[in-house]
Every structure is written in C-alpha cells, then in structure tokens.
Image (tube, helix red, strand yellow):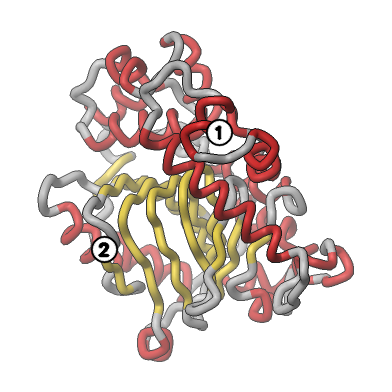
Amino acid sequence: MNQAVFPQAGPESFGAYHDLYAAGSTVSRIGDRFEATLLGRRAAGLLLFDRQIVGAVHQREVPRVRRDEHEHINIQVLRSGRMLAGAPGNERVLASGDTVLFDTTLPQRTVLYDADYVTVSLARDVVEEAVPNIRSLHGCILPRATFPALAEAVFSLARGTFGTPDVTRGGSRLLAELLRPAGDPSSWPERSWPERSWPEDVDDDLDAARRLRALLFIDANLGQRNLDVNAVASGSGLSRSSLYRAFAPVGGVAQEIIRRRVARLRSAILSQGGDVRISTLMWRFGFSTPSHGSRAFKGAYGLAPAQLRNEVRAPQRGVVDDLVPDCLRSWFQGLNRAPLSS
C-alpha cells in the first residue's frame, strides 16, 4: 500500500491543488478563502482520500468525461461541514455521515464550502458485481440513517494511522457489499429513492437550510467554550425545536460542534507543518480540556493530535510521500486499467 500527502504551500496552494486534479477534474475557487489538506492511500482495488477543503468546486463536465479514461466509482462521505454534491444542476446538501455516489463516466459536481470528507474510488468491476445498476444511482445521496454501516466502514478505513499501512485488502469488496442494498429500490425508505419527488422534500430542504445556517454560526464561534445548543439557537436565530430537528439526522448539535472542532484542529496541524503547540490549538478551538480534545480527535481520526503532529514533522521515509500530479495520475491509471479485485 502507498500513502501520500498533499504538500502545503502558502499563496500558491490553490495552484498546486488545481494542478493535482487537472487530469480528472476541473477545480475552481469559490469565495475568498481556500484551504486544502489531503491524505491519500492506495490499497488493492481502492484509492482513499481523506480531505479537508475550504472554498473549492470539483466538476467533471461532458467533454472531460468523454475524453478521459476514468470509469471507476467514487463514494464521498461527509464527516462534517458544508458540502453540495450531485449531477450538475441537481446537487443536494449533504449532512454529516451522508454518502454520495458518483459514476465517473457521467458528469458530476461537488461544491466544498468547508468540508471534512472522505472519498473512496473503487474499481468498477468490483462494484458492479454487487450493484449491477450502479450507473442508475449516479449522484444519489445515501443518508447515514439508512446506510449507517457504509459511512462507518469508510470512516474506519480512513482512521488508519497516518503513516501506517493498515488499510485491509478486503476494503473494496467490503464497501461494494455495503452498497448492494442501494441497488434494490424495495430496501430504501420510499422517499429516499432517487428521481422521485415527495412533498416531504420541502421539509428536508428547510431542515438542511437551517442546519447550514447554524453551521455558519458554529464555525464562526468555535473558540467560545460556552458554545452549546442555546448559544447556537440564539446566534443563528432558530428555535431550539427547529435546531433539534435539523440536527437529528447527524446526532445532535453537540456532536456537530465536536466534529467541527476536531476538523479545524487537524487542518491547523497539517497546514502548519507540525510546528504547533497542541495545547494552544485546543484552547483556540474551544475544547474544555486537552484530554477531552485528544479523545474526540482520536475517535474521529484514529490517532492523537500529538501523533499526527509527529508524523507531519518526521514522516517515515518510504511510507509517506508527496501527493503530486504524476503520483495521482498513476494511481487512477492503475485503478481504471488494471483494477485489483481484493
């Protein structure tokens, strides 16, 4: 297994990130702030990218789809933050733990306002063996409440310690099997089936809008140690009942605050090249104690903040390399031209 990390750069970071994905996606900026941290892993039959991206749009347009040789399947799972994804013109808001399916032979678009998420690329033959109609699910969002094992499996693979080759060979088949129910309409809650319109969708959209409104307030106030459901309700202009309903699918407001705090902590450690004091960052992002922050961080990412900082400072030679365009291009060529069934 190979692992790589996107090299950090100051003002040139967007240019480097754009060039990294030029072979497979058109990447553009959105808003006045861009940040990117990216860890990549390659194992038998899959590629895994653990990312935190602020202010970018990834898009595969029809001309690109027609000319490149990509035919793999992507699944993207949102840990926390703000993200839209889907077929162009039909993008939907994802909640924490939701999965979006993409067939790379079809156009797609992902808008990353401030998203901590995991992408897994799977060889088509492995997925089609479990889900023959996977193409019909392009752009479909699989809610975490309906497919909890899928989200947890992706996060478990991503929690492999940075710098340690512990992604299992069976990962691609495991994920393909967890996708199998998605190919059977009778196994879905009726309103979740793609290309169907339901009156309740109006309520779903309203809850998504409320959740995004609250997330903006949460992100702007992470350093406040009294940030709780009452503060979020008051600051975002929402009633407690509306807030509870909006965050029910993602485990509640308190859990979302923790997810956002650990996400910003990881981004700070990676983007500053390991030259940070963990205790200072803990304080900056509102953790009540360093031990509380460490436990939450390890639960999300599989290692303590200090361990990540040490890996960034002195990665093991031959285990972690820079993720550069030639590296990424060869990874995708290997997945599409000679997929490895695990």
Q: Residue furthest right?
A: 186
Point out the image quarter for the C terminus.
bottom right
Q: Dots 1 and 2: beta carbons under 8 Å?
A: no
* Three-letter code, disc 1: Ala
- Which sits in the foreground, 206 or 258? 206
Tell me which residue sits at (45%, 32%) in the image.
Answer: 161
Image coordinates of residue 211 in percent, x first then y, are: 56, 46
| 174 w.r.t. 100: above or below | above
Q: Looking at the rendering, which quadrant does residue 197 occupy?
A: bottom right
> Going by the image, does 262 lie left or right of 282?
right
| 77 w.r.t. 222: above or below | below
> Going by the image, does 204 lie left or right of 291?
right
Image coordinates of residue 122 in percent, x first then y, are: 55, 64
| 139 w.r.t. 112: above or below | below
Q: Gap in Å between the C-alphas at discs 1 and 2? A: 31 Å
Residue 138 at least partly seen: yes
Which residue does the numbered mark 2 point to in the structure image? 29
Q: Secondary structure at mark 2?
A: strand
Tell me which residue sits at (44%, 66%) in the image.
Answer: 110
Q: Earlier in the sequence, mark 1 or mark 2?
A: 2
| 195 w.r.t. 84: above or below | below
Image coordinates of residue 274 in percent, x first then y, are: 23, 27
Tell me which residue sits at (32%, 68%) in the image.
Answer: 329
* Three-letter code, disc 2: Arg
Image coordinates of residue 224 in percent, x first then y, are: 39, 21
Residue 2 at least partly seen: no
Neighbor class of circle 2 (other Cα within 10 Å; few <14, some 14-19, many 20+) is some
Which residue does the numbered mark 1 point to in the structure image? 233
Nearer the observer, disc 1 or disc 2? 1
Tell me which residue sits at (49%, 56%) in the image.
Answer: 119
Q: Secondary structure at mark 1?
A: helix
Neighbor class of circle 1 (other Cα within 10 Å; few <14, some 14-19, many 20+) is some
